[in-house]
Image (tube, rainbow, N blue to C red):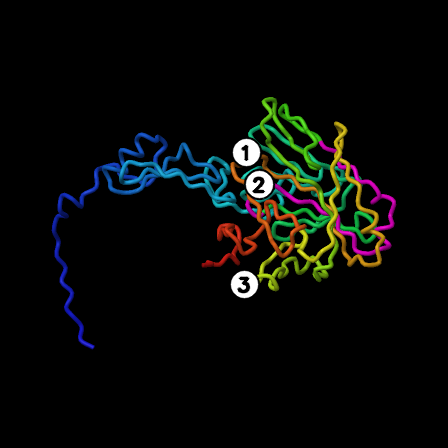
Amino acid sequence: MSLLPVVTVTASPPAWASSPVGCVSAVEDEAQAVRLAVECGQRVEVLSARTPWVTTTAEETGELTWRAATVAERAYVDGEWRSVDPMLRVSAGGIEPTAPVLPMRFSPGGDAPLARIEHEGRALELSSPLGSLPAPSVSGRTLVYESVLPDVDLRVSVDEDGTGFTEVLVVHTPEAAANPALSRLSFPLRTEGGLSVREHDGGLSVVDGSGLEVFASPTPLMWDSSGGVDSSDAPLRSFGARAFDDAPLLVERGVAPASEDQVAAMPAEFDGEAVTITPDREMLTSPETVWPVFIDPTFDAGEGVTPNDWTMIAEAWPAESYHKFSGDNGVGLCSTGVRSLCQDRP
């Protein structure tokens, strides 16, 4: 192999290569962003239009590009934008996600509210239906309050994009399911900042004075473990390989059911003080039920906070609900910002 000599020449760049003084990649003002993009020949982000989901950039042509992500890509924490980080940490106020889109706090045990979620001075607090809580174990973005009833754990998980949380009671045995405390579950609920709670299509809509939805809770569900996952130590499982030739599809078992699971809806009732759900007795007493059984309500950012919504229809499972599913499920939703297993698909 022959090596060519390296010659260093010092010279002034041509006029066309010079960038005007003040060329930056982002500015607050839209008009300034457009001017700089044209003059500098580069994209310039409009910071005043930035949200956790939306990025607006001025192009070299003077046009504006608006890009909206399906799940939140960033969070505004302590006066600065950061990557979303739902991992839980212990703080002076309780247990909190590191960098969520919506501030959240969870009970360290005792009589404190189970969960609190906030948005711009408005808040919702949800308490345990079973009274005082033990100190939880914390792993990643999940807390587990063990043995809130005999053979029943309370598990809370922060959404991957930091916009809400899922709470599930994990009922491990038929004997635990026979406990009268599980016949009807009432979660005390309190709001701040002028919010009101409305029943909506089996779930709840938490709105401000103008009717804008700030928080939302879809119809609570319960599901068994017919899909084959036998412990919360293995929360990810394949579902759907028989219907798709693609890579195995994944679902987070402590958050949502797998396609093979038995699923029952539990329409929520709100009486002004508590959200009440009635678990399906047939599932809890059926010899065909595979344990553990999971019983949830979920609270997330409402339509007035996030501009995005998604669902899918799976011909293989026409009765299954895939509204705001987690992960990519082999379709268009696939964000490496929130899922490391995301892969490019043709």
Front: mark 3 or 1: 3
Amino acid type at image mark 2: Thr
Q: Which residue is mark 3?
A: 247
Magenta segment includes 78: no
* CA–CA distance in space, label 2 to label 1: 9 Å
* CA–CA distance in space, label 3 to label 1: 33 Å
Q: Secondary structure at mark 2?
A: loop
Amino acid type at image mark 3: Ala
Q: Which labelled disc corresponds to residue 163?
A: 2
Magenta segment includes 169: yes
Residue 135 visible (yes or no): no
The quarter of the displayed image where residue 213 is located = top right
Residue at x 63%, y 57% (from the top left corner): 316
Residue 244 visible (yes or no): yes
Q: Which residue is mark 1?
A: 305
Residue at x 82%, y 48% (from the top left corner): 149
* CA–CA distance in space, label 3 to label 2: 27 Å
